[in-house]
Image (tube, helix red, strand yellow):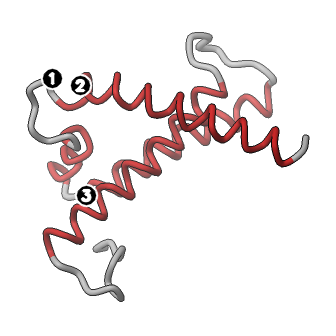
Amino acid sequence: MDLNELLNIHEDTCNSCREVMVKKNSDYTGGKTAQDIFANFNSAKIIGMHPVKGLLIRVIDKIQRINSFTNDKELSVSDETVTDACDDIVNYAILAKAMLIKERKEKKYSTKEEFVLPD
């Protein structure tokens, strides 16, 4: 693989991830008229967990799925591929970044405190 092939994969992945995020956003946030685009992650507050930490648990689930595939060379649930799990991780990273940016703006963090999560 050369750099151009890698950049093509990057572009294709970003385009695919964006399409998936648009489709899933309505499903996971309460429908097309919902006001909180992070509603499913903000539900982590119910158990006293920072929403980004709840999101990171979902990332770990995807990592474990990929790990299982590398160990067994197959997945039991066939309707989600390893590529799908990788794309989900990309989207979770973007969502985490967006949530932290929103939080920073609302709380007016200084640059030093920009992305510090509470314990």
Q: Name the residue under label 2.
A: 26
Tell me which amino acid carries mark 3.
Met
- 30 shown above or below 44: above
Q: Is residue 33 left or right of residue 94?
A: left
Residue 119 position (above or below residue 4): below
Closer-to-camera residue (36/52)? 36
Q: What residue type is labelled 1?
A: Lys
C-alpha span from label 3 to label 2: 23 Å
Q: Mark 1–mark 2 contact, CB under 8 Å?
A: yes
Q: Is 113 rendered above or below residue 60?
A: below
Residue at the spot 36% in from the left edge and 74% down from the top edge:
115
Q: Tell which tag, 1 or 3, sits nearer the viewer.
A: 1
Image coordinates of residue 23 in percent, x first then y, are 34, 22
Q: Which mark is residue 49?
A: 3
Residue 53: quarter of image: bottom left
Q: Name the residue under label 1.
A: 32
Q: Where is residue 87 in the image (x, y as percent from the top left)?
A: 56, 34
Task: Answer left or right for 1 relative to 84.
Answer: right
Whole-percent x, y for residue 69 in the image: 73, 28
| Amino acid type of the residue that numbered disc 2 sits on in the rendered structure | Ser
